[in-house]
Protein backbone atom coordinates (compact mmCIF):
# COMPACT_ATOMS: atom_id res chain seq x y z
CA UNK A 1 0.00 0.00 0.00
CA UNK A 2 1.30 3.41 -0.92
CA UNK A 3 2.03 5.92 1.84
CA UNK A 4 -0.23 8.62 0.30
CA UNK A 5 -3.28 6.39 0.03
CA UNK A 6 -5.71 6.32 2.95
CA UNK A 7 -6.04 3.07 4.77
CA UNK A 8 -9.43 1.49 3.99
CA UNK A 9 -9.69 0.43 7.65
CA UNK A 10 -9.73 4.10 8.76
CA UNK A 11 -12.84 5.00 6.68
CA UNK A 12 -15.51 3.71 9.15
CA UNK A 13 -13.65 5.32 12.03
CA UNK A 14 -13.77 8.76 10.32
CA UNK A 15 -17.51 8.38 9.62
CA UNK A 16 -18.14 7.43 13.22
CA UNK A 17 -16.21 10.50 14.41
CA UNK A 18 -18.28 12.71 12.11
CA UNK A 19 -21.53 11.17 13.41
CA UNK A 20 -20.48 11.72 17.03
CA UNK A 21 -19.51 15.32 16.25
CA UNK A 22 -22.83 15.93 14.47
CA UNK A 23 -24.74 14.35 17.37
CA UNK A 24 -22.99 16.53 19.93
CA UNK A 25 -23.67 19.65 17.89
CA UNK A 26 -27.35 18.69 17.50
CA UNK A 27 -27.80 17.98 21.22
CA UNK A 28 -26.08 21.24 22.15
CA UNK A 29 -28.32 23.20 19.77
CA UNK A 30 -31.45 21.51 21.09
CA UNK A 31 -30.35 22.16 24.68
CA UNK A 32 -29.89 25.86 23.93
CA UNK A 33 -33.30 26.07 22.28
CA UNK A 34 -34.97 24.42 25.27
CA UNK A 35 -33.10 26.76 27.61
CA UNK A 36 -34.26 29.81 25.65
CA UNK A 37 -37.87 28.61 25.67
CA UNK A 38 -37.75 28.07 29.43
CA UNK A 39 -36.26 31.54 29.99
CA UNK A 40 -38.95 33.16 27.82
CA UNK A 41 -41.73 31.31 29.64
CA UNK A 42 -40.36 32.27 33.05
CA UNK A 43 -39.80 35.94 32.21
CA UNK A 44 -43.02 36.70 30.33
CA UNK A 45 -45.80 38.42 32.21
CA UNK A 46 -48.82 36.25 32.87
CA UNK A 47 -52.07 37.29 31.21
CA UNK A 48 -54.10 37.59 34.39
CA UNK A 49 -56.85 40.13 34.85
CA UNK A 50 -56.20 42.42 37.75
CA UNK A 51 -58.81 43.05 40.40
CA UNK A 52 -59.01 46.77 39.67
CA UNK A 53 -59.97 46.18 36.04
CA UNK A 54 -62.70 43.77 37.11
CA UNK A 55 -64.10 46.15 39.74
CA UNK A 56 -64.17 49.08 37.30
CA UNK A 57 -66.43 47.13 34.94
CA UNK A 58 -70.06 48.25 34.94
CA UNK A 59 -71.26 45.69 37.49
CA UNK A 60 -73.95 46.51 40.01
CA UNK A 61 -72.32 48.06 43.07
CA UNK A 62 -73.54 49.34 46.38
CA UNK A 63 -71.39 51.34 48.78
CA UNK A 64 -68.70 53.98 48.23
CA UNK A 65 -66.04 53.35 45.58
CA UNK A 66 -63.30 54.29 48.04
CA UNK A 67 -64.45 51.87 50.76
CA UNK A 68 -61.51 50.06 52.40
CA UNK A 69 -63.26 46.67 51.90
CA UNK A 70 -64.83 45.52 48.65
CA UNK A 71 -66.77 42.27 48.53
CA UNK A 72 -67.28 40.84 45.06
CA UNK A 73 -70.00 38.21 44.84
CA UNK A 74 -69.82 35.94 41.82
CA UNK A 75 -73.43 34.88 41.95
CA UNK A 76 -75.96 32.72 40.18
CA UNK A 77 -79.66 33.09 40.82
CA UNK A 78 -79.94 29.30 40.77
CA UNK A 79 -77.27 28.86 43.46
CA UNK A 80 -78.57 27.57 46.79
CA UNK A 81 -75.70 29.21 48.71
CA UNK A 82 -76.44 32.56 47.07
CA UNK A 83 -80.10 32.12 48.01
CA UNK A 84 -79.19 31.39 51.64
CA UNK A 85 -76.88 34.46 51.71
CA UNK A 86 -79.69 36.64 50.33
CA UNK A 87 -82.40 35.12 52.56
CA UNK A 88 -80.29 35.82 55.64
CA UNK A 89 -79.98 39.46 54.57
CA UNK A 90 -76.18 39.34 54.83
CA UNK A 91 -75.59 42.23 52.46
CA UNK A 92 -77.88 44.55 54.43
CA UNK A 93 -76.51 43.37 57.77
CA UNK A 94 -72.95 44.14 56.68
CA UNK A 95 -73.96 47.51 55.27
CA UNK A 96 -75.78 48.35 58.51
CA UNK A 97 -72.84 47.28 60.65
CA UNK A 98 -69.94 48.74 58.62
CA UNK A 99 -71.61 51.56 56.67
CA UNK A 100 -69.21 53.34 54.31
CA UNK A 101 -66.36 50.95 55.09
CA UNK A 102 -67.71 48.25 52.77
CA UNK A 103 -68.76 48.04 49.13
CA UNK A 104 -70.55 45.17 47.38
CA UNK A 105 -70.05 44.32 43.72
CA UNK A 106 -72.23 41.75 41.97
CA UNK A 107 -70.67 39.73 39.14
CA UNK A 108 -72.90 37.36 37.19
CA UNK A 109 -71.73 33.75 37.11
CA UNK A 110 -74.77 32.04 35.57
CA UNK A 111 -73.77 28.37 35.31
CA UNK A 112 -75.92 26.32 37.70
CA UNK A 113 -79.37 26.09 36.12
CA UNK A 114 -80.75 26.45 32.61
CA UNK A 115 -82.64 29.56 33.75
CA UNK A 116 -79.54 31.24 35.21
CA UNK A 117 -78.41 33.03 32.01
CA UNK A 118 -81.88 34.53 31.47
CA UNK A 119 -82.09 35.63 35.10
CA UNK A 120 -78.66 37.26 34.77
CA UNK A 121 -79.74 38.98 31.55
CA UNK A 122 -82.85 40.30 33.28
CA UNK A 123 -80.60 41.52 36.09
CA UNK A 124 -78.59 43.50 33.55
CA UNK A 125 -81.80 45.04 32.25
CA UNK A 126 -82.74 45.99 35.81
CA UNK A 127 -79.25 47.44 36.26
CA UNK A 128 -79.73 49.59 33.16
CA UNK A 129 -82.88 50.98 34.83
CA UNK A 130 -81.13 51.53 38.20
CA UNK A 131 -83.28 48.80 39.76
CA UNK A 132 -80.77 45.96 40.11
CA UNK A 133 -80.83 45.54 43.87
CA UNK A 134 -84.64 45.65 43.93
CA UNK A 135 -84.70 43.01 41.16
CA UNK A 136 -82.24 40.82 43.05
CA UNK A 137 -84.25 41.05 46.28
CA UNK A 138 -87.48 40.32 44.40
CA UNK A 139 -85.98 37.35 42.57
CA UNK A 140 -84.50 35.76 45.68
CA UNK A 141 -87.73 36.33 47.62
CA UNK A 142 -89.70 34.72 44.79
CA UNK A 143 -87.37 31.72 44.57
CA UNK A 144 -87.54 31.28 48.32
CA UNK A 145 -91.29 31.85 48.45
Image: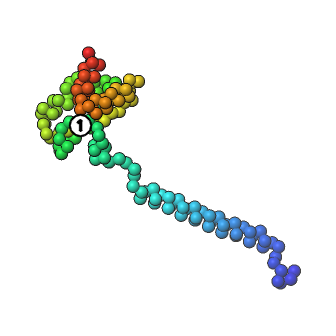
Pinpoint residue 18: horizontal percent, then vertical percent: 70, 69
Above or below: residue 132 compared with residue 103: above
State the image quarter where residue 145 is shown: top left
State the image quarter where residue 96 is shown: top left
SS for callout 1: strand
Residue under circle 1?
Answer: 61
Q: Is residue 44 left or right of residue 32?
A: left
> Which one is nearer the viewer's eye here, 69 or 137?
137
Which residue is depicted at the point 74% across and 69% down? Answer: 15
Which residue is depicted at the point 22% across and 41% down? Answer: 70
Report the residue that reaches farthest toward the front.
129
Above or below: residue 16 compared with residue 91: below
> Which one is nearer the viewer's eye here, 23 or 104?
104
Report the residue that reaches farthest toward the right.
1
Which residue is depicted at the point 20% across and 29% down? Answer: 90
Q: Is residue 97 left or right of residue 134?
A: left
> Which one is nearer the viewer's eye here, 85 or 60?
60
Above or below: residue 51 compared with residue 106: below
Answer few, some or many: residues within 10 Å of disc 1's Cα (few below 14, many 20 plus, some between 14 and 19).
some
Pinpoint residue 7: horizontal percent, then vertical percent: 81, 76
Amino acid sequence: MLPNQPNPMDQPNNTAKRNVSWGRWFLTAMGLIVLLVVIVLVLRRPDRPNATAMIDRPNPQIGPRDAPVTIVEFGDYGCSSCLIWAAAGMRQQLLDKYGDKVRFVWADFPVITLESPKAAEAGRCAYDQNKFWEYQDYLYNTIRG
